[in-house]
Image (tube, rainbow, N blue to C red):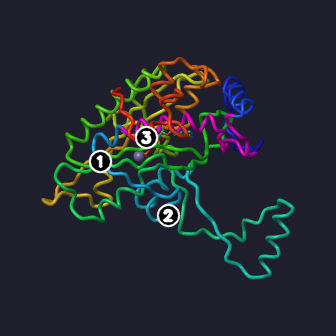
Amino acid sequence: MPSDVRLDSPEQEHFLRELIDAGLLIESGVPGVYGHGAEFERVRAAFAALITEAGRASGAEQLTFPPVIPKRNLETAGYVGNFPHLAGSIFGFEGSEADARVVRERAAAHEDWSEYADQTDLMMLPAACYPLYPAIAARGPVPPGGVLVDIGAAWVFRHEPSLDPARRQSFRMHELVRIGEAEGVSNWRADWAKRAVELLSGLGLDARIENASDPFFGRAGRLLAANQSAEELKWELVIPIAGPEPTACASFNYHLDRFAETWGLRFADGTAAHTSCIGFGQERIVAALLRTHGLEPESWPEAVRSRLRLTSDEEGAGGGPRPGATVTAW
Ligand code: ATP
Ligand code: ZN
């Protein structure tokens, strides 16, 4: 096992083994990087469809971004400075024929060839919402009433190898982002925190909201985390999975006008907009469902299957609602 792998509880490691043995997760050889079996992915897609529908019902615009992001974006946003331990940079080869021969030999022997790799202008996307703020700012002034965007379930990367099946290096984060006037944005976040608890409790999960902070790096980071916590800028929806503590399965972040100042998100009269993003950890929610209701979605309580539209008469191809299906309120 590489030395940077986080040591997790035996219960978490045991649960990981169960998920792999049941074919729900597929091992890659690196902790925190897994393929998904068909059943796992069906449940994930079914849950994602509920969020997409809720977003659509509120008039959300759908925008999709790739799992890589310009390095410049994350530098400007402060991500590189605040979370250097989680960031993933992309390196590429730009050497000569002779260099390539060395790389080929070292790679074949699984030896270090990193001296032949140069940093590119791309990094791995660490949270779904980063590409959105400059994209909206580029449109010009924020329209009155603001904007609401559903970014969908984006693939994100965080360098935090672990044997906890709920702590991945590569996972999908479904984010909704609201940009607008201070009061509207803050109410939107509070509203969604309530709706999310209702939604997940309705799926038989023991969900509650807690005040939280981001894992900022180092001593300066501890101060940032303390401020974030004191101002209640981050709430998490936690659910018991396999750890000693319940796991954060969704987060509700209020950035005040920080991102607006960074990216120039202003109304026509020059006032800075406020922004908020909410992120659902897709794999954590599936893991919570599997842990709570058992490893076979077919034997889950009927009410849970029906809310996720996994029941055979309601389900479309791959889970989720049929096209044109009636939306159930939750
Ligand atoms: P930002 O404010 O920078 O956009 P964020 O709030 O979107 O960050 P987090 O709160 O850290 O980012 O993550 C959102 C959700 O993603 C978490 O609530 C959790 O469910 C899930 N998540 C975070 N880290 C992991 C991980 N390592 N493995 C699996 N799921 C994760
Ligand atoms: Zn976000």
Q: Earlier in the sequence, mark 1 or mark 3?
A: 1
Q: CA distance from mark 3 to mark 2?
A: 22 Å
Q: Earlier in the sequence, mark 1 or mark 2?
A: 2
Residue 228 pos. (x, y %): 37, 38
Q: Please give the label number shown on residue 71.
A: 2
Label 1, residues with CA under 10 Å away: few <14, some 14-19, many ≥20:
many
Corner quadrant of residue 322: top left
Query: Could you tell me the amino acid type at mark 1?
Result: Leu
Residue at the disc numbered 3 = 279
The magenta segment is: 24-53
Assign a secondary structure to mark 2: helix
Label 2, residues with CA under 10 Å away: few <14, some 14-19, many ≥20:
many
Q: CA distance from mark 1 to mark 3?
A: 14 Å
Residue 183 pos. (x, y %): 19, 40
Residue 289 horizontal side relative to residue 34, left or right: left
Above or below: residue 228 compared with residue 139: above
Residue at the disc numbered 1 = 148
Assign a secondary structure to mark 1: strand
Q: CA distance from mark 1 to mark 2?
A: 25 Å
Q: Does any atom of ligand 1 lie closer than 8 Å to the CB of label 3?
A: yes
At x 35%, y 26%, the residue is 330
Above or below: residue 200 compared with residue 188: above
Viewer-side residue, 277 vs 18 = 18
Q: Earlier in the sequence, mark 3 or mark 2?
A: 2
At x 82%, y 70%, the residue is 104
Query: Which of labels 1 and 3 is toward the front?
Result: 1
Label 3, residues with CA under 10 Å away: few <14, some 14-19, many ≥20:
many
Corner quadrant of residue 209: top left
Residue 100 pos. (x, y %): 77, 76
